[in-house]
Image (cartoon, grey):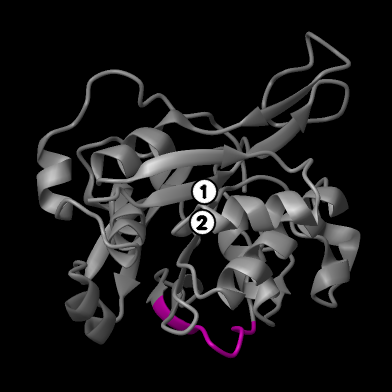
Amino acid sequence: MTTPAILILAMPARTDTASSWGLGRIPGHGFSLIPDACITRMRRLGCTVGVMASIRDDEDIETALDATEGVLLLGGEDVSSVHWGGGDADCVAPSRERDAFELAVVRSATGRRLPVLGICRGAQLLNVALGGTLIPHVELHRSDSGGITTHRVHVDAAFAQQADWPGEVDIASAHHQAIDRLAPPMRAVGYDPAGLIEAAVSDAPPALAVQWHPEFMPDGEVGAWLPFTWLARAVGAGTPCGEAVAAPEQAGDEALTGVG
């Protein structure tokens, strides 16, 4: 039996530019970053993991997707308004190069009907790639220092039953862009207490956008597993979420901190 392969698009960072990743002490170098939890949790859910940096061309993208059953988009910088018709005044350090690369991957992947999971910035970019727009700035979804805060998400009852999610889930949040107008194939399935969209899903193409950061949550919390479990099941793998939470690994799950 073949183990499904997940392609994770790494977060680019340069040490000689303003960055939330704390790499300024060694200027002149580029990095591709992935929180360990994204890798270890997908593996524990029965998938293999591949990584792709945002320095590849279209031919590399197609070759990578040929060997992939699903795609995972991570957090980071704001999505530039050039792609969704907004204003850049409130955008924080947008990277048009990263946007262009990830939009190309998502559009090819969804054209192939590969399942795509977008986390925070990844959720925003997924919505934009499929034809939606963004709110350029929201308050109260990150801490006073710009880091992680927590709040509750209310889950649509029909989706909760279909996906085996709870009706409410506590999550870790750090963002200031958010989904505004949903892309045509997407429907909202999770909201914060004020009604802001926190999760959206599409059946065709198969896609899930979650505004929170499951990779920054402890193994023992259900919200840390729900998005990864959705992706694992969508590609034909997956340990039931409860079993994965009940058997956390003790090493290797430290996550990077940042906004997006």
Magenta run includes residue 184:
yes
Give residue 100's position: percent from left, percent from top: 81, 58
The residue type indicated by label 2 comes to: Val
- Kindly check if marks 2 and 1 are in contact, taking CB atoms under 8 A apart as contact: yes
Residue 239 in picture, x, y percent from top left:
17, 51
To which residue does mark 2 refer?
71
The answer to whether residue 178 is visible is: no
The type of residue carrying mark 1 is Leu
Residue 11 % position (x, y):
65, 39
Q: Which residue is mark 1?
A: 7
Rendered view: 135 above or below 65: below
How many tags in the picture?
2
SS of the residue under disc 2: strand
Give, as a single range, the part of the protein colored magenta: 181-189
Residue 76 in the image, given as x and y percentages of width and height: 66, 45
The local secondary structure at tag 1 comes to strand
Q: Earlier in the sequence, mark 2 or mark 1?
A: 1
Quick check: 154 left or right of 13? left
Q: Which residue is situated farthest in the top direction here?
A: 25
Other residues around mark 2 within 10 Å, as few (<14) / some (14–19) / many (≥20): many
In this view, the residue in front, 248 or 169, is: 248
Q: Magenta includes 167?
A: no
The quadrant holding residue 26 is top right
| Vertical order, 47 against 14 (above or below) | below
Residue at (49%, 68%) from the top-left corner?
A: 114
